[in-house]
Image (cartoon, rainbow, N blue to C red):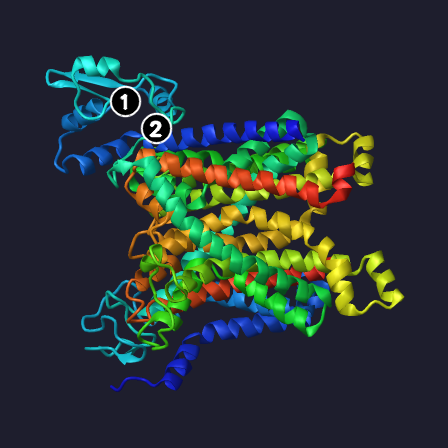
Amino acid sequence: MGLFILRRVWVMVLTALCLTFVVFFLTNLYPNLEKLAKTQGNMRMTDEEVARWLDNRGYGAPILSKYGQWLGVWPGWTHETERGVTGRCIDGLATPEQAAGAPRFCGVIQGDWGYSTVFRDEVSGIVGTRLGLTGKLMLWVLVLMVPAALAVGVLAGMREGSATDRTLSTFSIATTATPEYVSGVIFIAIFASSAVGLKWFKGTATSAMEDANFENFFLPVLTIALYGMGYIARMTRASMTEVMTAQYVRTARLKGVSFPNIVMKHALRNALIAPFTVIMLQFPWLLNGVVIVETLFNYKGFGWTLVQAAGNNDIELLLAVSVVSVIVVLVTQLISDIGYVYLNPRIRIS
Amino acid sequence: MDPLGWGEIIARVLWQFLPVWVSLVALFAISIAFKRRLGLYGKLFDSTIGMIGFALVMFWVFTGIYAGLFDMIATHDPLGQVSGMKNKGPGTPLQGAGEADYGWYLLGGDNLARDVFSRMVTGSWVVVQIAPLATLFAFMVGITLGLPAGFYGGRLDTFLSFLANLILAFPVILLFYLLVTPEIVATGVPNYMATVLFVFPLIFMAVLLNSRFHTKPGFRTPLLIAVLGVMGWLYLSLISEAGSKVAVLPRALDLFDIPGGILVVFVSVVFVNSPTVFRIVRGLAMDIKTRDYVAAAQTRGEGPWYIMLWEILPNARGPLIVDFCLRIGYTTILLGTLGFFGLGLPPESPDWGSTINEGRKLLSIYLHPALPPALALLSLVLGLNLLADGLREESLKD
């Protein structure tokens, strides 16, 4: 087991390195840097001024060296002028003596995630607060989605082919066919717009960042939960129908155990192994939904930050965002593998 | 002219779709009459769910074709603006309508005074064009790489699976932002990716035909030259675009030009979809290669590629066809996502994602610009899912 986890962690680090390098490469292509220089500096800069602007800020170095600097395995850039020294590891303008005392390496390994050019703040701070906000959203999504999906799946799979099964299966197909931007728009139209006049909920979740309540937070949570729910429900249904035809359920039935008892005591535990894996593997999808819903409802969390960073080519923020999302994806995969082994004794023994 | 009431709007919208209804009825009548002779397609008409799904899908396919190719269903120009029609509700009579103009905006006008109904109808053409084709390309890539990975295993499998997981670990939207922004397009990265990705159908066809007919060189060589010649020309016309980084073909030989942005969208959708297809094909190949008929083929002395493409692939078709339907739906959702974030397609494009994105900004006051495209997308994807469900049920029966 230890070796297995160790190998998975190694693959995870490798994946994160490859992905960040791809992001780094694409964001550091010259047209992107030129756009960055013009938005940060002056829209009317000439090509030479752009090149000087980029050189002064360390963007002119070869890509591998820049990537090494971000990672913290290559000495950070310094730039000397007659007024003083600027550099990656130096705050503002420093005298040569101060610059000599500054650390040579400052990258992710040293805990320095860099500086966001859009939000004009430390990346680590931004990612931290935004992740907190998204964590709150995800928590409520899971609280709503998982029990509802399992209930729908178990009810549908309990009696295969019945009217309940048909209705619930169609419902779960319909939810998987409704992407967040469609269901979100429909929900806002029905429940939040002044044109229909129900106005039960609010169409934006901006106020939910400080003070989340049912009125301003339910619609975004519902929108994300609904899309993910159908898939989990269908998997639960499939695994439930399989269990219900198993030998031991038939034996229990022949013994005269009542139907609710069969479902609750004999079938349910075995039927919930497969959905567990599916729920964990749903996280990458949820991450996608989070980006759409946060944009739609203007909830300034992690997904919203991703869109802002990507839209403005905020290199260091984008890198941090991709590191975080890669870790989320891979850690959930790891948990799902380990959990599967623990839940399923047949695999543990073999 | 007076504004139309809701009953009249519905009647007129249904009337506009008349060619679609006629085609649907004809298609269903013919298919049901001959369903015993049509294999899996015919069996689809035994399941109600499958029929409903198929009807929904074909409704939008016909709509797309009639609106896109024959200019029929739409009542107005999807890009045309008429002054005084900004944000007007459904059924508003057209101001200053000439003799030839259709008299009303059936589903109202949007923020820029364009007809919502015509935009929705024309938008279906964008989806009907791109989604199935992009899914097909993704399948070609996934099959060409997934079969050897599952069949041989070992180093090759480890490497390809690592690559697939790498792409899958990327948040889709971040990938879209990185690939589709104008700055990246200017560097030619998507064009190079197109060059690599679109070569896979050629490889696939070449290996497919060669493995089957390599014992008869007299027949194989002309066949390969003909097929690869036509496909190669199409390939070169597809990837070479005047003014971009990849302009290998002189203009005279270039068969068609993909309008700006569409190629980029196409490439990114194929790129995002192929790793999942790869994983499915790899799993199926690993499962099927242990069967007896594969061993029999090996004993006969067939080559590995013959076994992969003519023994394993046909026997994996059931799950692949089902997944193909589901994946077209997913591709439609991805296209909508791209439009929703305003990436790739030009902002005035009538595709559903862009229209939803534009409509949502005024959603709390005006519902009519955003709802029709949203419901259209919903019904198409729902149809594809139901179709896949019906196909799965029917293919499991025997």
Chain under label 2? A
Q: How far across and how far down the image is residue B297, in percent?
A: 79, 35
Q: Is residue A96 above or below residue B234?
A: above
Q: How far across and how far down the image is residue A46, in percent?
A: 13, 30
Res. B306 mark: none
Q: Quadrant of residue B112?
A: bottom left
Name the element at disc 1.
loop
Residue that numbered label 1 is attached to: A89
Q: How far across and how far down the image is residue A312, in percent?
A: 28, 41
Q: Classify the position of the N terminus of chain B by image quarter.
A: bottom left
Q: Quadrant of residue A125?
A: top left
Name the element at disc 2.
loop
Residue that numbered label 2 is attached to: A112
Q: Classify the position of the C terminus of chain B by image quarter.
A: bottom right
Whether residue B277 appears in this view of the structure is yes
Relative to A232, A308 lies left or right: left
Whether residue B66 appears in this view of the structure is no
Relative to A199, B397 lies left or right: right
Q: Amino acid at mark 1?
A: Cys
Looking at the picture, tell me which residue is in the foreground, B54 or A95. A95
Is the Cβ of the residue at disc 1 closer than 8 Å to that at disc 2? Answer: yes
Q: Residues within 10 Å of mark 2 (few under 14, many from 20)?
A: some
Q: Residue sitting at 78 percent across and 69 percent down?
A: A259
Going from the N terminus, do you reach mark 1 or mark 2 first? 1
Label 1 and label 2: CA atoms lie apart by: 9 Å
Farthest residue toward the front? A211
Q: Amino acid at mark 2?
A: Asp
Chain under label 1? A
Looking at the picture, tell me which residue is in the foreground, A190 or A106. A106
Q: Residues within 10 Å of mark 1 (few under 14, many from 20)?
A: many
Looking at the picture, tell me which residue is in the foreground, A288 or B4. A288
